[in-house]
Image: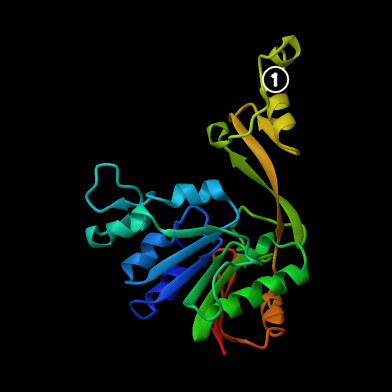
Amino acid sequence: MLWPGATKFLNSLPKGSIVCDVGCGDGKYFPAIWETGSYVIGTDISEPLLQTSIGACKEHGSDDAGPHTRLISKENSGLNKRPAVAVADCMHIPIQSRSVDAALCIAVMHHLSTVSRRLRCLKELSRIVKIGGSIIIQAWALEQDQDSKRKFAGNDVFVPFNAQPRYLNKVASKGDGDTDKAKSAAEVYSDAYEGAEYDETKGLVVFQRYCHMYRQGELETLIAQIEELELVESAFESGNWQVILRVK
């Protein structure tokens, strides 16, 4: 699912823009960027997710076409074969200063545990984008819609993440001895991944992700400390705070 605010932001960019998707994950925004006539550079801390982003988007009319947001036209299909991606965290972006026209940072900043890390991320975003360029940031909000299933006790919480075992490449050995043979699936995964639990009923490995839930106005307070950034717009969308910035 692509957030409407991010899609609207991409559609507002001039054709031919170079967009850096910081924390791009499996590249779910790549097709939307290509279809607006822009080029994308993706960075993420997870190499397996970046590997998934390569060739993961489907052409219109293909037999195994995925969700509409993943479809790309034939004229842009060549970009899908080998998108420009790099392993990096959001505080050390391997992009030259003032080299991209815009940047996305979607669902990234709520994983940063300190104020200094959040400011460092903002500084990096402001560094790589050209003067006059735009940045969009979305992060989880402490304030949730009344009918939302997400309810948070405070700003800093751990949120369960369910992973299918087949996507995990690090599993403790099983069957090397009588002790290992007697191990349950829960023991196998807890040995392989610190803090992981195995949900027997769903067959899923459950990890606890750190998340910082932003209060209303908290992102704006951080942005005000970066002199290169100007706040253009603030909005609330589907349980997320969204800001659009201009680099000055």
Mark 1 nearby-residue class (10 Å; few <14, some 14–19, many ≥20)? few
Q: Is residue 211 above or below residue 52?
A: below
Q: Nearer the viewer, residue 142 or 13?
A: 13
Q: Is 125 left or right of 225, judged from the image as shown?
A: left
Image location (x, y in percent) of residue 214: 69, 68
Q: Is residue 199 above or below residue 128?
A: above
Q: Secondary structure at mark 1?
A: loop
Q: Is residue 50 above or below residue 236?
A: above
Point out residue 37 in the picture as x, y percentages from the top left corner: 32, 72
Give the residue type that dot 1 points to.
Ser
Residue that extends furthest to the top in the rendered view of this protein: 178
Give the x, y percent position of residue 165.
57, 32
Q: Is residue 184 left or right of residue 52?
A: right
Position of 22 with respect to 207 (left or right) is left
Quarter of the picture containing the N terminus is bottom left
Closer-to-camera residue (110/55): 55
Q: Quadrant of residue 223?
A: bottom right
Identify the image quadrant of residue 233: bottom right
Q: Is residue 189 left or right of 87 when viewed as pictured? A: right
Who's the residue at 49% across and 78% down the image? 99
Q: In this rendering, is residue 113 above or below 234?
A: above
* Residue at the spot of label 1: 184
